[in-house]
Amino acid sequence: MTGQDRDLGIGGSPRRVEDQALLTGEARFSGDVAVEGLLYAAFCRSHYPFAQISAIDTSWAAASPGVVAVFCAGDLDLDPVSPPGMDQMLSEFWLRPALARDVVRFVGEAVAVVIADSQANAIDAAALIEVDYAPLPHIIDPGEAARPGALAIHPEAGTNIVIDQHLAAGQESGTHTTVRARLGNHRMAGAPMEGASVTVEVAGEHTLTLWAATQMPHMVRDGLARHLGLEPEQIRVVSTNVGGSFGGKTTAIPEYVIAAASALRLRRPVRWVQSRTENLLEMHARSQVFDISLSADDQGRITSFGVDALADLGAYPGVNLGIAATTRRLSPGPYKIPHVDYRHRGVCTNTAPVGAFRGAGRPEAAGLIERSIDLLANRLGIDPVEFRRRNLIEMDAFPYDNLVGTIYDTGNYVAALDEAASLIGYEALRREQQHRREGSARRQIGIGVACYIELSASVPGFNSDNASLEIDLDGRFQVRVGTAAHGQGHHTVYAQIVSEVFGIEPAIVTVVDADTASVARGRGTGSSRSAQIGGSAVLNAAHAVFSQATGLAAEMLEASPADITPDRSGLGLCLRGSPSSAVNWKELAEFANRPGLGNPGLAAAPGFKQTKDGTVSFGSHIAVVEIDTETGAVGLRQIVAVDDCGTILNPMLAEGQVHGGMLGGIAQALFEEMLYDDDGNPLTTTFADYAFPSAAEFPSFQTAHTVTPTDNNPLGAKGIGEVGTTGSWAAVQNAVNDALAPFGVVHLDPPYTPQRVWTAINEHSADQPTSPG
């Protein structure tokens, strides 16, 4: 490819092809799909965190204007709705019912559904359903739920502890200093711009088409088939444009199953669009607490790391079990730790089930180890950057086994840390900090360092995917891929990969995804897998078709395949050294499809499977915060992110992923928190109550990359979708605690609201020791 063409292939930053429809309003979402005779669903939800249901009176609702049907659990008789594999892993009493039948276990759990001719009529009628509840003692705190003898939320289990695993590996040696602390990672909301949404149409006997806001259409299809007793082939799921997901729109959630079952029962199309309050009631994430101990010898080398982790699963276990396991797998971070002792428990509480949000266990692990590192560095009197340098894994140690179940493929951790420290001017910042402290300035600064790792494409099944490439009779290229784009820029990047192989303009490449009728199989998008797994599948398909094309061109030009090369115009293939001897893509496609050949044409779908463990991205973030010591207000003054995702396929999109991820991590640290009162009532169910920052609350971000390709896939790519959240979350925590250290604050959990920070400052005497006690 020429130097000008270089920007069109791998490593270039061509303009995104996805943006035109979104910016002009042409893009359509699930709630925009026009279907004749459409009905609307609205749910009656529990106002109690834990209660027995003695009776449900739907008569007033059924008689309301426009109401077509009202269904309770006994009417639809659906099996429990669980993520794939959970119904095999867990006893049935742990699983979530589609509609609560005899008992409700959290505020917001659906009890009944109204189907009406308009959304307004459905909502009004749902408010008329009368449910007789007998309130039960509830448990909101996971620590209380885990205590022996605690009231079991699922009585058949006899306990709230769903999982209790202990792993010890390696051996502790040498003299050591130890710090101990309790570190929290609070509950937050996913809060995408668009909540969950589905439109269901019945087409033929027991055949459904769903337009759904989901990042995993094939998984939704398969889940619906399982729950409704249909074959997957009887269901088509189309993932329309999605207004944000961040991990919260993956499987067939209860509302999707109920909408589909209602459509089947009524033989009418049904739509459900989640309200903002419903979204904030149900789409929760994080919520783990860690009791840690970290030890080092007198040279500042870590000797042992101990963790007792307690994950709040909410009312029902599910993907939250996998999230807690991911936290354990990444808990040692990028450090040489010769001994790890890790216990993790998952408990049920009378709160909304906890699911995934950007990172899904990774930011929890980064916050856990990075706060521990700072606590120990402070105790030893070693600068936080220097302490990390002494303990980071060296380049010649890869692949590296971290003792708790994860192999790191490649890395250059010290280089990322040194680059971040250089870019932010670390030494000058420390001098400024010391000057402010000595002058008892009202505004104090804190400097937070975080080195993180990010595991992606490691979940079983997420390490492979399907992609096909075909050159049609018009000479255009069509890619069909099993990932599902919802804002990341997949169509742009996949076209770049094809462009790289064929030397063509990306504009002649069409990408088809997110439709189970058009793409035979796929795992969707999640775990930052799309570039490395979907992209490698596209690359394999491109190489296979290119090989076919060169063979056909050699036949047409009466030459050896080794002498065939893309022509400089990108319009076809030519004889090397003789560009006038050429055939274009249309001619090649026609030749491949000539009658009597029995040839499927120019097409291939070899797919890709990553045979090793997932890839491990890494990086270092350094944040600077400024705290008003009289009001407790915290402002993020500066943040630098140096990330390594292996081969960068598109620098502009990679930077955008880092920016978006950083917003999520910073927002959780400084603003966002889902709160319940002692009676189990959620207190943050609108954006009037749930702190949700805008761009005005953030400075410009400074980003850079080191490049350490992996050998786990042919592109050398690693995940980048969640690195920004993982690194920034930990860096901002350390920065705020660094600013509070002169006031005797050893550790303060986020979010760092002005009230929380002001209280911490005023509860501690300024003459207390600044290092952990």
Image (spheres, rainbow, N blue to C red):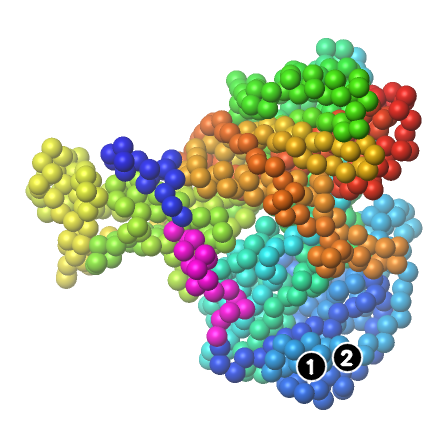
Who's the residue at 61% across and 55% down the image? 192
Left or right of 478, for residue 66: right
Q: Position of residue 491 (x, y in %)?
A: 40, 50
Residue toward you, 679 or 748: 748
Q: Position of residue 52 (x, y in %)?
A: 85, 69
Residue toward you, 242 or 183: 242
Quarter of the image where one finds residue 109: bottom right
Q: Position of residue 520 (x, y in %)?
A: 41, 59
Q: Is there CB contact under 8 Å for labels 2 and 1?
A: yes
Question: Does the segment drawn in magenta span residue 506?
Answer: no
User: Which amino acid does the dot numbered 1 rest on?
Assistant: Val
Crowd tier of the residue under label 2, counting other residues whose Cα lies within 10 Å: few below 14, some 14–19, many 20 or above: many
Q: Quadrant of the N terminus?
A: top left
Residue toward you, 147 or 295: 295
Residue 587 in the image: above or below residue 118: above
| Residue extent of the magenta highlight | 17-34
Which element carries disc 1, helix, strand or loop? strand
User: Which amino acid does the dot numbered 2 rest on?
Assistant: Ile
The residue that label 1 is drawn on is 70
Label at residue 129:
2
Residue 186 in the image: above or below residue 213: above
Left or right of 523, for residue 337: right
Left or right of 90, for residue 138: right
Residue toward you, 15 or 208: 15
Residue 602 seen: yes
Residue 178 seen: no
Which element carries disc 2, helix, strand or loop? loop
Quarter of the image where one finds residue 172: top right
Q: Position of residue 206 (x, y in %)?
A: 51, 77
